[in-house]
Amino acid sequence: MSDPLLGPALESFIRHLATERGLSDKYQFNTRRALEHFFAWLADRHGVTQAGEITSSHISAYLDHRKRAGLAAGSIKISIVAIKIFLRHLHARGAIAADAAEGMTLPRLARQLPETLNELDVERLLAATAPDSGDPLFIRDRAILELLYASGLRAAELVGARLENLDLEQGIIRVTGKGNKTRIVPVGARARDVLAGYLAQARPKLVKPRTASVLFLSNRGQGLTTHRVWEIVRDAAKRAGLETRVYPHLMRHSFATHLLSNGADLRVIQEMLGHADISTTEIYTHVDSTRLKTVHHKFHPRA
């Protein structure tokens, strides 16, 4: 067993995250940054340059150092997760004799409830981009807003959607989410109508000679960026006169919260959102209970 140097081991590990696990560029970047900081600290404070030299005492001392430096609990958790999966990866492949991070627990984080729009504000937002406008970009934007709310897609999933993955007759769309996982999500009747109008009236006008089968197109006949989707949602919110900061993921939160408040099963919502763990979806139960308490306090005579 050869004890790997930290630098080459990190490069190999990041390639593993990208090619074998299909994790996002953002995840790879955050993991690399966390590990590079840890390795620099190890070399500077303890002269450690090889993975097999890392001990649990090193890790604990490093985390204490980061806490004293005022690092937020969320950032400390990113560091712990990065260290744990890195050492677990090396140990599983026999590159190091022991996993020094095995058994270490993650810090508990205060749970932040996601922001949502109420159903009336969603209606105002959707109405702000008129479907009967002759401008193909306006028709496209309305279709984007409808699909975000109807199916709870992430912005990256929306821009990656392709024509062959949308079945308006069946009312479903196949999307590829985090970790390259594919799921099928229902598309509601109102969204299907707007999408059908976009496909018949607007998209053909945006197509150029080299246009691919991407569902939503720019005026140059290319796929949209997630940044452009953010702009579309933000501009619609301004036209609707909404004071809340509106962004694509807010539509996803609203989709889940409104499903739950209208009686949908949490497991079904988990499947539609593409959450690997039901605990991620459970946060919407807290959103719904908070909303109910607010309504009760506002309208009950003895609240």
Image (tube, rainbow, N blue to C red):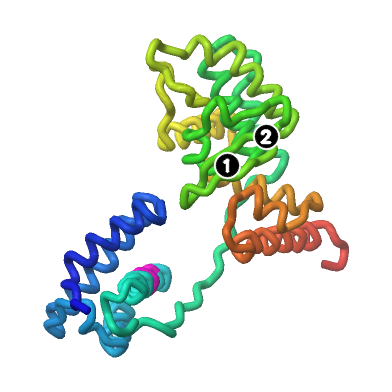
User: Residue at point 60% right, 23% down?
Assistant: 129
Q: How many marks?
A: 2
Within-10-Å neighbours for mark 2: few <14, some 14–19, many 20+:
some
Residue marked by disc 1: 153
Percent coordinates x, y for residue 278 in the rendering: 64, 63
Distance between the alpha carbons at the discs numbered 2 and 1: 12 Å
Bounds of the magenta span? 78-82
Query: For residue 124, what is the image quadrant?
Result: top right
Task: Please name the amino acid that badge 1 sits on.
Answer: Leu
Front-most of 48 and 282? 48
- In the rendering, which numbered label is found on residue 96? none
Specify the farthest residue to the front: 1
Residue marked by disc 2: 172
Residue 247 seen: no
Percent coordinates x, y for residue 155 in the rendering: 50, 40
Which of the two discs, 2 and 1, sits closer to the camera? 2
Percent coordinates x, y for residue 139 in the rendering: 58, 19
Asked whether, in this view, residue 277 is left or right of residue 8, the answer is: right
User: In the image, is residue 202 above or below residue 159?
Assistant: above
Front-most of 32 and 248? 32
Q: Secondary structure at mark 1?
A: loop
Task: Please name the amino acid that badge 2 sits on.
Answer: Ile
